[in-house]
């Protein structure tokens, strides 16, 4: 398989694509803002001296709705794609998904507990509800992943195959528990639960954004430092050890980054599938498997792809809004099948 | 120097290795021979720290192998496993370049070493190709180049452990591979190589360890080890041993 593009070209293209996605995401929606107005209002928001007649509405929409939503999309997409790279490296399999270590299922369980449990307790005060939901989802994801990691360890070594199987088992178990909550829920709660499971960038606010941004910064600064070690890990665990890599520490870091990243992303935006699977794969097809390119390129591509998916979610049935998980699954699942069949040929 | 003293290894109820002592000498190639299941790969596993000995110890430059920090150890000791399972489309020179990870010699020097190691493993013509597009034998040579690059140029104090490096190679490349290993040792490195071909071992090794059910049946020069009685006792085959007409090393012919 020849590499289609040089890393430089890829980075320039992806950066431009990402900027375009940001611009469109700020401009388009139920109220479409002229593209130029978006730029001018945006410039005013960051304090540039731009004449502002007639831009009050644009500034309001931009500042209060579109900007937090766009930032949420960027960080969620980036973090999911980076976690995908980490998991595909850890399992040394290009078809691995961040959900394999149980983090998505755990987060879904946490959310179900918060939503259904909250309604049993007669409703949580409106002010706390979103934070409680996010916190429960985050803790659920972290908890189940920690358990999967623990089950995969024996004699001070982490067995990746055992971890994979433990992840499948705990995902099923968490799924059953979510099913039980679904069965016990009343109609209104059921609807909240279902929509949460389909993911959405709707209702983004700065308050819910900053924990995710913090996590995204940590993960996207940390993982690229391990790019060479991830390359060596693809040779095999013992080969990586013979090359001087501290493999156990690396595996722990990869699982931790994924649990943190996906946990925070799911807590902020619900379950959004396939980004973590498809994006690294796509970048690998274009520019090869070297993690020094793969990690930063996946970050940019994941952020862009999620913003475009969100645009489709917003515009396809406007003024109603599709859950974004549906959009990513409609794009991602056929692409995944294509990858499988292509590999077989 | 890599030294093994009174080494034993148990796995469950099986005694895999019993009371083995040896030292890899700088500038020498030690061949390890023995039937399937004799413990050759287990011995190599213990000597590179992948398996923990039940008894005895392994020392690298008089310091316990497990006490070495990973990177410093990797600068001295390289291991070529029997099979590798790289499933990603790295280019050949990128795979070989991973051998330079433990070092900080700079891009330019690394590139020279990668080229030299690829030439030594007769894989220079594979540069630019995807690892996944290579045949089994070509992959084996690329991994050989990778471990050679890790210790390049192979001076005194470097140790190379190879597990059946010729298992997938055609006759010509069996010789070019062992020739490259021989040259590595001639520059001062200590080499241990697991082999199945008795004649290859006779030609390229300075000493041979003959393993039988986890015990050292013999550890000596090829002339001393490769004798009809030993080979009958360990492998159960009847052979004639004659001196090679041109080179003088033992030549083993099945009867």
Image: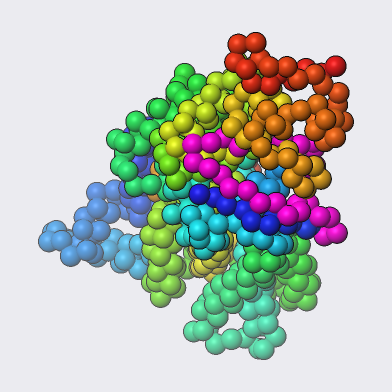
Position of A308 relative to A74 (above/below): above
Position of A340 relative to A87 (above/below): above
A294 or A171, which is in the foreground?
A294
Position of A160 relative to A279 (above/below): below
Instruction: Determine whether, in the image, residue A157 is placed left or right of residue A291.
Output: right
Residue farthest toward the top in the current orientation of the protein? B245
Q: How is the image coloured?
A: rainbow
A145 or B148, which is in the foreground?
B148
Measuring 40% from the left and 69% from the top, which residue is drawn there? A214
Question: Is B28 in the magenta?
Answer: yes
In the image, the segment drawn in magenta is B12-38
Question: Residue A28 appears at what percent x and percent y?
Answer: 39, 51
Asked if residue B81 shows in the view, the reply is yes
Question: Is A57 in the magenta?
Answer: no
Measuring 67% from the left and 77% from the top, which residue is drawn there? A113
Instruction: Determine whether, in the image, residue B7 is placed left or right of residue A14.
Output: right
Instruction: Determine whether, in the image, residue A326 is placed left or right of residue A35.
Output: right
A113 or B235, which is in the foreground?
B235
Question: Residue B124 appears at what percent x and percent y?
Answer: 45, 21
Question: Residue A23 appears at what percent x and percent y?
Answer: 33, 50
Measuring 49% from the left and 36% from the top, which residue is drawn there? B27
Position of the C terminus of chain B, as image quadrant, is top right
Position of B27 relative to A67 (above/below): above
Question: Residue A178 appears at what percent x and percent y?
Answer: 73, 70
Asked if residue A80 shows in the view, the reply is no
Measuring 43% from the left and 33% from the top, which residue is drawn there? B187
Count of residue discs: 0
């Amino acid at each position: 398989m020849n590499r289609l593009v040089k890393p430089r070209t890829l980075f320039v293209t992806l950066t431009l694509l990402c900027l375009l996605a940001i611009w469109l995401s700020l401009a388009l929606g139920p109220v479409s803002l002229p593209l130029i107005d978006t730029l001018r209002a945006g410039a005013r928001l960051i304090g540039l001296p731009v004449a502002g007649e007639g831009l009050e509405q644009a500034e309001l929409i931009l500042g209060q709705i579109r900007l937090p939503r766009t930032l949420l999309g960027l960080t969620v997409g980036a973090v999911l794609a980076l976690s995908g790279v980490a998991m595909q490296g850890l399992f040394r399999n290009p078809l691995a998904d961040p959900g394999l270590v149980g983090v998505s299922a755990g987060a879904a369980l946490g959310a179900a507990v918060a939503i259904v449990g909250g309604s049993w307790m007669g409703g949580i005060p409106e002010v706390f509800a979103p934070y409680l939901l996010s916190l429960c989802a985050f803790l659920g994801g972290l908890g189940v992943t920690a358990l999967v990691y623990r089950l995969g360890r024996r004699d001070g070594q982490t067995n990746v195959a055992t971890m994979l199987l433990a992840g499948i088992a705990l995902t099923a178990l968490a799924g059953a528990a979510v099913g039980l909550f679904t069965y016990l829920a009343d109609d209104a709660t059921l609807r909240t639960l279902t929509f949460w499971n389909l993911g959405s960038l709707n209702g983004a606010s700065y308050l819910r954004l900053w924990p995710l941004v913090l996590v995204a910064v940590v993960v996207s600064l940390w993982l690229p430092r391990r790019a060479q070690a991830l390359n060596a890990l693809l040779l095999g665990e013992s080969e990586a050890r013979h090359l001087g890599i501290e493999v156990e520490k690396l595996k722990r870091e990869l699982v931790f980054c994924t649990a943190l990243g996906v946990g925070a992303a799911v807590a902020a935006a619900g379950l959004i599938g396939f980004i973590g699977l498809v994006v690294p794969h796509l970048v690998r097809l274009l520019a090869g498997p070297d993690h020094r390119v793969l990690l930063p390129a996946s970050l940019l591509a994941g952020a862009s792809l999620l913003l475009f998916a969100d645009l489709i979610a917003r515009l396809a049935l406007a003024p109603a809004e599709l859950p974004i998980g549906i959009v990513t699954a409609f794009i991602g699942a056929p692409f995944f099948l294509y990858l499988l069949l292509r590999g077989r040929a | 120097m890599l030294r093994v003293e009174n080494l034993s290894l148990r796995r469950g109820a099986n005694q895999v290795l019993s009371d083995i002592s040896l030292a890899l000498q700088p500038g020498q190639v030690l061949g390890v021979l023995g039937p399937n299941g004799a413990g050759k790969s287990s011995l190599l596993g213990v000597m590179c720290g992948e398996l923990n000995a039940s008894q005895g110890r392994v020392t690298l430059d008089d310091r316990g192998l497990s006490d070495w920090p990973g990177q410093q150890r990797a600068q001295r000791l390289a291991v070529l496993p029997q099979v590798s399972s790289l499933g990603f489309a790295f280019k050949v020179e990128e795979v070989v370049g991973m051998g330079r990870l433990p070092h900080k010699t700079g891009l330019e020097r690394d590139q020279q070493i990668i080229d030299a190691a690829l030439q030594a493993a007769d894989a220079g013509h594979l540069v630019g190709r995807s690892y996944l597009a290579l045949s089994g034998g070509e992959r084996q040579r690329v991994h050989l180049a990778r471990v050679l690059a890790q210790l390049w140029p192979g001076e005194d104090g470097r140790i190379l452990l190879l597990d059946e490096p010729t298992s997938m190679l055609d006759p010509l490349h069996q010789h070019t591979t062992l020739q490259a290993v021989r040259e590595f040792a001639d520059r001062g490195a200590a080499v241990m190589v697991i082999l199945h071909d008795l004649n290859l071992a006779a030609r390229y090794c300075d000493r041979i360890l003959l393993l039988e059910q986890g015990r050292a049946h013999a550890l000596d020069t090829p002339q001393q080890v490769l004798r009809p009685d030993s080979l009958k006792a360990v492998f159960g085959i009847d052979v004639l041993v004659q001196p090679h007409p041109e080179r003088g090393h033992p030549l083993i012919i099945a009867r």
